[in-house]
Amino acid sequence: MKYLFAALAPALLAIASPALAAPKQGDVVIRHVTIVDVEAAKTVAGQAVVLKGDDIVAVGADAVIAKDWRAARTVEGKGRYLIPGLWDMHVHFGGGPELIDENRALLPLYIANGITTIRDCSGDLPEQVLAWRSEIASGSLFGPRLLTSGAKIEGIAPVWKGTIEVGSEADVDAALDRLKTRDKVDFVKITDSTLKPELFLYALTKAKALGLRTSGHIPMALTVDQAVDAGISSIEHLDYAYNAGAKDEAAIAADFAAGRIDRAEANRRLDAGFDRDTAMAAYRRFAVKGVFVTPTLNGSRIIAYLDSDDHSKDAGLAYIGPKLRKTYDWRIERAAKADAAGIATRHKQIEDIATILPMLAEAGVPIIAGTDAGFLNSFNYPGFGLHDEIELFTQKGLTPAQALASATRAGPAWFGWLDRYGAIKPGMAADLVLLTKNPLEDVAATRAIDTVVMRGAVQDRAALDKMLADTRAKVAAWNAAAKP
Ligand SMILES: [Zn+2]
């Protein structure tokens, strides 16, 4: 009883004498701003938001907040729209140890583009990325919050470098143990260039039992449902989700597993066998099982149209160092080898695949924005690419609110962190982006960035422009030094 009274006493005092209540102190206040409630797909005008340290501590009508709070810094939000920080849930770092500096120089590009969190889906520099994750968290390296899979799980002698190669269940157990206990990864990435299909399923099941989320590429010898049943948490790239729509998917997987057809023939039959009802039934199962899909649609589109799109004057090239630029050649050369029929097939496939985006949304599957930006993935520019991705989502049938949710709420939802990220209310992280246009009218407004707040630190337009200019200067110097 005594404790209850002690807790009530200050409240009673405040009611009795409001004039005595001193204003509360925050670090930053954003005033007269329109808050975008992404979850409800609506705006709330005339608000103020108070930040203290890494946290949002108060949100409310501007006049009320102005009376109750003081802050060391005021950001004027009149005529502007405030959204939660953006998340790019599929990026890569890599290209070999000589490319560490050029990869590190990509980090500020994310912040300059309003991206406060990135999910690294593995490359060939896993130790480096794990070190960056700690350095960013401790404040000694400037960059967005970095979540990483560490080294990905693969079969023996895969096409990818820097992986953990597994050839047996015991190998999978050891790999997961290392990822969980030594590397403390944020999730597990599994790809299938040489991984045995049964080990792919074993790794999904085992990771889930250990409490680790999984994401990856599904082997052609398996049906998508087999991966879903084994507990895959997110399917990367829309084409894998598309395959679940083929009526005879199981027969195609079996023919591929038995070596009766090659990958190209399997893809041709999957495309020909696509059926809307089959697909919707599969996507409803995804939704029930809590499987998310990261389309990386813009990345696939760029690769599909390498034959006809001229990228030589892309503004993004000014941010890509010469060694990273060299990693683009792999895909460019591969695309150049295709004949006219191959190119036509590639174009048709990407257009067909994109049609499932609104179907996934209709089925209730959470869609995650991720770019696939990084080494190898030519002309897919870190930071800038996320805006391209979500704009493409709206062109392919999502509403601006759905597209915005894919880049602000789907990432936190996947990690189970919606109590901390993805909305603007007290107790949430002070990761925010102030826009000069309304993203619910046109999601391209996410490019119109006035200010970015990253863990409570305010980066105004001048600071963001300086980040971009600094990276361009670094790249220009590397380019000059690389000239023979
Ligand atoms: Zn990727």
Image (cartoon, grey):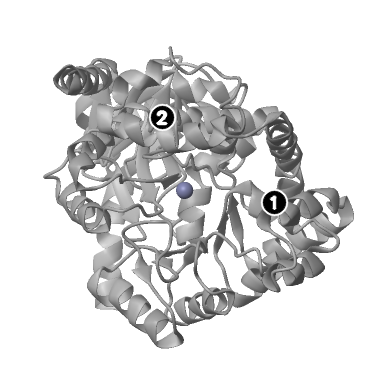
Single out the mark in the foreground, 1 or 2: 1
Which of 146/197 is in front? 197
Q: Quadrant of residue 473?
A: top left
Is residue 153 visible in the rendered structure shown here? Answer: yes
Residue 8, located in which quarter of the rendered image?
bottom left
Q: Which residue is mark 1?
A: 264
User: Which residue is at 80% across, 54% downward?
Assistant: 269
Q: Earlier in the sequence, mark 1 or mark 2?
A: 1
Point out residue 274 in the picture as x, y percentages from the top left corner: 83, 51
Residue 336, image x, y percentages: 55, 30
Query: Is ligand 1 closer than 8 angstroms to the Cβ of mark 1?
Result: no
Question: From this viewpoint, is residue 76 visible?
Answer: no
> What residue sits 37% from the left and 77% below the top?
176
Query: CA–CA distance between discs 1 and 2?
Result: 29 Å
Q: x, y (%) of residue 144?
A: 29, 41
Expressed as whole percent of the image width and height from the top left, the position of residue 405 reads 56, 41
Q: Amino acid at mark 1?
A: Ala
The residue nearer to you, when weighing 481 against 187, is 481
Mark 2 falls on what kind of element? loop
Give SS at disc 1.
helix
> Which image quarter holds the C terminus?
top left
Mark 1 Cα shell of 10 Å, populated few (<14), some (14-19), many (≥20)? few
Disc 1 to disc 2: CB gap under 8 Å: no
Q: Residue at x 40, y 66 (%)?
A: 157
Classify 373 as above or below 250. Answer: above
Residue to which mark 2 is pinned: 381
Q: Indicate left or right for 409 with 1 as reference.
A: right
